[in-house]
Image (cartoon, rainbow, N blue to C red):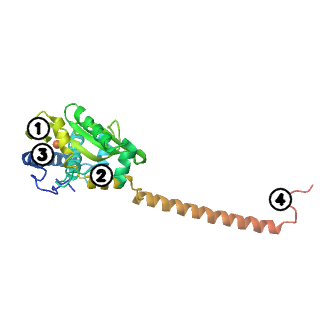
Amino acid sequence: MAFKLPELAYKVDALEPHIDKATMEIHHQKHHAGYTNKLNAAIEGTDLEGMEIEEILAKVSKHSDAVRNNGGGFYNHSLFWSVMSPDGGEEPKATSKLGKAIKASFKSFDNFKEKFAAAAATRFGSGWAWLCVGRGGKLFVTSTPNQDNPLMDVAPKKGTPILGLDVWEHAYYLNYQNKRGDYVSAFFNVIDWGAVGKRYNAATRPKKATKKTAVKKTTAKKAAAKTTVKKAATKKVAAKKTRGRPKGSKAKRRVG
Ligand SMILES: [Fe+2]
């Protein structure tokens, strides 16, 4: 099934004054829709049709530039809309799992904020700033060029993104022109930390066994059971043989 442009959970003017209506309209209806359509065109009739987007991105180095650019564009923007809300802006609760992880990884929320803003400000040209979950649930901040992201096998630092900020000029130029720093500051007023927290929880939840793993495990169990039955049968036969021999003789012994 083809990928679908996700609907926004809020109105296009709901994030004003931080992100203006015109930017939201063009960004969602033109840019994101464009990535979605081009991704679908790039995978049509290939093995990638029907795969999850995360699965495609994980091996993106094996695919065309069209899949890399538009697959990244599709995923990144879908995440971006979902971590913003007109009711956003409050810091994550210190007692929440995410709040604790931010403290453990960055020492304080302000420290994290500084790192994230710096990643967004110093990304040369177009790209994204990310807050990601790495190994052991540890958080890290990174940035990627163009429509790349940390799920891709080409990313220098890989992890699961839970917050992303689009720093392409199309994301802010109408309202902020060249002042990317002001746009980054404004973004903090609309971050939906509840949504980011849900993503953090999902990324750190122990993975359920996939069907393949479950089948493998069952096969291994069956094989082990078979071996046990075989061993028991061999033991039985050996015991029978031993019973038939004279006392003290372990094996056939020739007495010369
Ligand atoms: Fe964008």
Residue for point 22% across, 37% down: 127
Mark 1 vs mark 3, foreground winner is 1
Task: Give the residue type at disc 2.
Answer: Pro
Residue, disc 4: 252
Front residue of 166 and 101: 101
Residue for point 9% across, 40% down: 175
Q: First in sequence: mark 3 or mark 4?
A: 3
Image quarter (top left, top right, bottom left or bottom right) of the C terminus? bottom right
Q: Is residue 47 visible?
A: no
Q: First in sequence: mark 1 or mark 3?
A: 3
Q: Categorize mark 2 by other alpha carbons within 10 Å: few (<14), some (14-19), many (20+).
A: some
State how far apart marks 1 and 4 are (Cα).
Answer: 95 Å
Asked if residue 108 is positioned above or below residue 82 in the image, the reply reads above
Residue for point 34% across, 51% down: 99
Mark number displayed over residue 176: 1
Q: First in sequence: mark 3 or mark 2?
A: 3
Image quarter (top left, top right, bottom left or bottom right) of the N terminus? bottom left
Task: Give the residue type at disc 1.
Answer: Tyr
Mark 1 vs mark 4, foreground winner is 1
Q: First in sequence: mark 2 or mark 1?
A: 2
Q: Disc 1, disc 4: CB below 8 Å?
A: no
Asked if residue 215 is positioned above or below residue 133 in the image, the reply reads below
Q: Secondary structure at mark 3?
A: helix
Q: Disc 2, disc 4: CB below 8 Å?
A: no
Mark number displayed over residue 92: 2
